[in-house]
Image (cartoon, coloured by chain):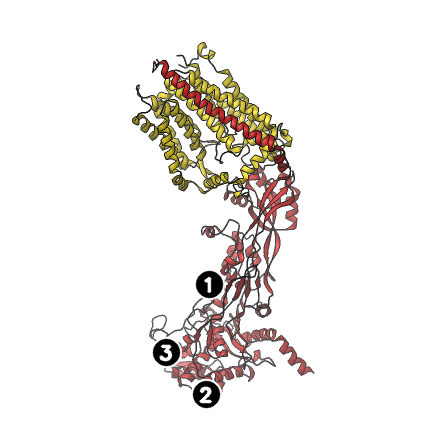
Chain colours: A yellow, B red
Amino acid sequence: MLRLDRRLLHNVDWPLLGAAFAIVILSVICLSSLGLGRGGSGLALRQLMWVGVGIGALLVVVTFDYRSFVRAAPALYLVGLGLLVTVFVLGRMVSGARRWIHLGPLTFQPSELFKLIFILTLAWALTWRREAQPNSRGTLGWTFALVAVPFVLVVRQPDLGTALVLLPVLGAVLVGVGVRLRILGGLAGAGVALMPIAWFFLKPYQRDRLLVYLDPFRDPLGTAYNVIQAKIAIGSGQLLGKGISGATQSRLAFLPERHTDFIFAVFAEMWGFVGCLVLIVAYGVLVLRGFEIAVVTREARGRIIALGITALFAAQTLINLGMVTGLLPVVGIPLPLMSYGGSSMVVSFMALGLLLSVRMRQFQ
Amino acid sequence: MDLDHESTARREAWKRRVLSLAAVAGIAFVGLLGQLWYLQVLEGGKLQEMSERNRIRIRPVAAPRGILFDRNGLALVDNRPAFTLSLIPREIDDRDTVMARLSVLLKIPLSELQEALERVPPDSFRPVRVRRGLTLDEVTKVEERKLELPGVVVEVEPQRVYPTSTFAAHLLGYVREVSDDQMKQGRYRRGDMIGQSGLERLLDEYLRGRDGGERIEVDALGRPVQVMRREEPDPGAQVITTVDRRIQEAAERAMAGRSGAVVVMDPRNGDVLAMTSSPAFELDRLAGNLDKEEWLKVIRDPLTPLMNRALQSQYAPGSVFKVVVAAAGLQEGSLTPMDRIYCNGEFHLGQWTFKDWKEGGHGHVDTRTALIHSCNIFFYQAGLKVGPAAIARYAEAFGLGAPSGIDLGGEKAGLVPFADGRRRVDGRKWQAGDTVNMSIGQGQVLVTPMQVARMMSAVANGGVLWRPRLVQRVERVDGSLAYSSSSKMTGRVDLSPIVWAFLRHALSGVVNEGGTGGAARIPGIDVAGKTGTAQSVNKSDAAKGQDHAWFASFGPAQDPEVVVVVLVERGGKGGQVAAPIARQIYQAIFLEKVAMVQLGEDG
């Protein structure tokens, strides 16, 4: 199982990998330009290191048959839940949330890893009986039970962003396996009906963000600051961008979270609409190749994994870009392969690895 | 190997569904490009301009604290701009380096800087105040190295400024940054300056005002260029007190170097014109950067500078209490103005001998001359005639043994023995000797200077006990009234007018007819008063010269305008120590009158 035969290599999806590496290169350029004149490019170097770790993780994942991961899904699920609980016990508060576990000098965000475990668990739950009927009450109930527990844990961390990304992934997979739209619509309706209740469980800062989304000038000195500054940064890039030295919004630190969640605003200010077009085309290629893999794969678990991971990339990208460009409320979601952050980068590469693994073994 | 050998139809259905999901994602990406086109191309020019001009920082603007005025419109405390060192957590990129540089530059302990930062979220752009009251020198140092210190700013904030650092310290109270404990009440923001004692604490809600905010444009180096938008702070409300700054200053000057308290009150309405306790603490020092050690030094100071002796210290009233005994006896009929005894300096009660303070005695004395010369022997006998129950009743009527009701907190109630039950405070049976001690204000009687001022006011005004008033009104900046208080009568001593007249006449004699209070005599002003020399409760202080000196007085005797009560701790005899201090205060109060009289004499 550990050896890669030539036939597998032949099936590597080069456009997918090419798009991913294009994005990573743009990320490193962006981070190093942020560091210019401000005491070195430590961020870019560390990001490069994480890319290296990510490539290693990708290679490890690819060498395994993805079906062995699906078989291990129940165990992974329990480990993942354990990690999420550990965050509550050991996690350190950062900006009012416990999302990280500290291992020596490194920090690790279990909810990132859980995104993959979530998809594997879905693949396992929806196919564990040979004759599983996607529309049967049993399968759906079972699946939702498996989803609900980690969902609540993640929301409580509080990491609303991760929780919100898991929902479209779940939706896409359920649509894919053929759950009737009527049932999905009913569930979505119930979700909307529960929203006023959910409001009570939101932290004050999360409520603020939602309100600011509805009316950005509600609190221009406070929460809306991020949104306004990001819009100014993006817009001021205009068609061709200001280049590295001209990007005052980003360089002068008006932009908060500029190397993590809001990195796209930095990129847009520096490279303008043309640069954004290139970046978005790269994401488009990545996502479309993902859907392509999902379409051509015949094996049920592989399909679900391919679709789930594609939906994960698409949802993270679209929600992050929507938030940075002011189309969606601000929730803490990194831009995959672009934002600075070890956990996110390594997990993104592992996801790519799974996708490639499915693709390479699609005809087996 | 495959789990399913599915039909072509099912494969087609899967394909269809995935492709429609792909279409949804594709449409979303196109929509995103549309938004980018809108922002960057259509709105690009406008936003570009905004990014040029709109280099905004946000800076809170502290509301100036309300000013406290005296009754004549003179400021008791004011504000002046002061420099505050603040950190903007979000703008500090390399926290350790910046903190280390700052620590070395201004000699602020690294731990202090780190603590300040740890209490706020690291992505906050609200400045965290680290140190107030920077010197110009320190400000220059920071400004010169601005580029090496990203996120370090110097703000200008209003700060309290006092006429002198100890002026009316106990009355005004000090202002200090909100403590961790106070933060838990949830009413304050970190870094707020709030009143911690005195009127500053009592009226903090009114005085504090509401902070504003400022969006300022900065250049590429972070230097402010112009203010973009300013949300003006609401300044705190102004407080008009009952205090007379001139009298307050005179009282403090007169008490310089002494331990004790002075209360000056208007007997016509209970207004507190001055209240001082010494030694006083330094208001500006307690407001500043006081480290733990310095704070402990203030708290553990054996002279207890933080205690307001006018309200919180209890002393035996000594001979001042003879006024109560005389009032009780004359009103109840057990004493008459004509009562005469021969005082040889000793009084025998059973096996005990009680002595007069004057070796050899006063000779023939009647009720009035006994008050004037403060003859103990006369009052020993008078006390036994009047009886402890009546004395206690009248003492309570004069407001002793209960808080005066002044707004400032922490007031002590004092003690009137025999008021309830016929036992001593320590539970032993009440003896005639206890009555003898009580009649000259010794033994277990305890009073505060404020209570004595209230009692003397009643003597001066014919029996009305006022609730001491410190605050006349609080006015918002727009002139509207936020709070006002009027004089309130809280008790009445019912004596016949003849008794009142007798007491006032006798007390005038204490000062003007060669009595114990002669040192308070001022030509042109008829001061009336009673001296007291109280044995300290503490046995180790029983040595001579360690007694507390009292002088409780009012003037002018015929038409009293002020009551002046002076207490000097371990000062010695009331007539020798406290009365001259009162005299100085009267001279300041009746400055013009005194000057006129002197002119008349000289001319």
- Work out whether mark 1 precedes mark 3 in sequence or the reverse, and give the earlier one: 3
Amino acid tagged 2: Pro
Instruction: Give the quadrant of the C terminus of chain A.
Output: top left
Residue assigned mark 2? B337
Residue assigned mark 1? B409
- Work out whether mark 2 precedes mark 1 in sequence or the reverse, and give the earlier one: 2
Instruction: Give the structural element (helix, strand or loop) at label 2.
Output: loop
Q: Position of residue B488 (x, y in %)?
A: 47, 71
Amino acid tagged 1: Gly
Q: Position of residue B150 (x, y in %)?
A: 60, 39
- Work out whether mark 3 precedes mark 2 in sequence or the reverse, and give the earlier one: 2
In the picture shown, does residue B37 fall above or below B107?
Answer: above
* Residue A154 disc label: none
In the picture shown, does residue A161 fall above or below B320?
Answer: above
Chain identity of mark 3: B
The residue positioned 57% from the left and 26% from the top of the image is A276
| Mark in front: 1 vs 3 | 1
